[in-house]
């Protein structure tokens, strides 16, 4: 299982992570990315991590 975290201070609100998440775990709320979906669905594909240029998304396996 994986835990996805988003640093709202670092997030620039581009929305690319939300568009690329295949399980719709990430959505945009007030122009910032947030984990709003069922995070247990995360497979660790890292698409959100790779696309986040400022490095505001972390993925950790547990």
Image: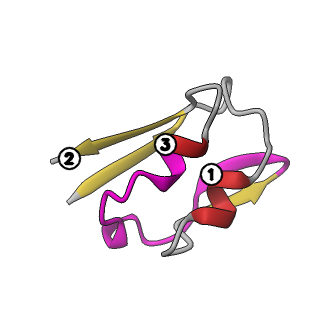
Q: What span is in magenta?
A: 30-49
Depicted 40 relative to depicted 52: above or below: below
**Which x, y percent locates residue 56?**
57, 31
Looking at the image, is mark 1 or mark 3 nearer the viewer? 3
Residue located at (49% from left, 54% from top): 47
- Residue density around tag 2, few if under 14, some if 14–19, many if 20 or more, within 10 Å: few
Left/right placement of residue 22 relative to residue 59 reads right
- Residue density around tag 3, few if under 14, some if 14–19, many if 20 or more, within 10 Å: some
Q: Which mark is residue 49?
A: 3
The residue beneath circle 2 is 61
Mark 1 vs 3, N-terminal side = 1
Mark 3 vs 2, N-terminal side = 3
**Which x, y percent locates residue 46?**
41, 51
Looking at the image, is mark 3 or mark 2 nearer the viewer? 3
In whole angstroms, how far apart are the C-alphas of marks 3 and 2?
A: 13 Å
**Which x, y percent locates residue 18?**
65, 60
In whole angstroms, how far apart are the C-alphas of marks 1 and 2?
A: 19 Å
Depicted 18 relative to depicted 62: above or below: below
**Which x, y percent locates residue 9?**
68, 24
Quadrant where the N terminus sits is bottom left
- Residue density around tag 1, few if under 14, some if 14–19, many if 20 or more, within 10 Å: many
Tell me the SS state at disc 3. helix
In whole angstroms, how far apart are the C-alphas of marks 1 and 3?
A: 13 Å
Residue located at (51% from left, 73% from top): 22
Which of the 4 quarters of the picture holds residue 44? Answer: bottom left
Q: Nearer the viewer, residue 54 or 35?
A: 54
Tell me the SS state at disc 2. strand
Mark 1 vs 2, N-terminal side = 1
Q: Which mark is residue 34?
A: 1
């Amino acid at each position: 299982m994986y835990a996805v975290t988003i640093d709202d201070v670092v997030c620039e609100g581009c929305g690319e992570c939300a568009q690329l998440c295949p399980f719709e775990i990430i959505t945009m709320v007030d122009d910032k990315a947030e984990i709003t979906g069922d995070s247990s669905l995360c497979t660790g594909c890292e698409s959100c991590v790779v696309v986040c240029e400022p490095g505001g998304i972390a993925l950790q396996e547990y």
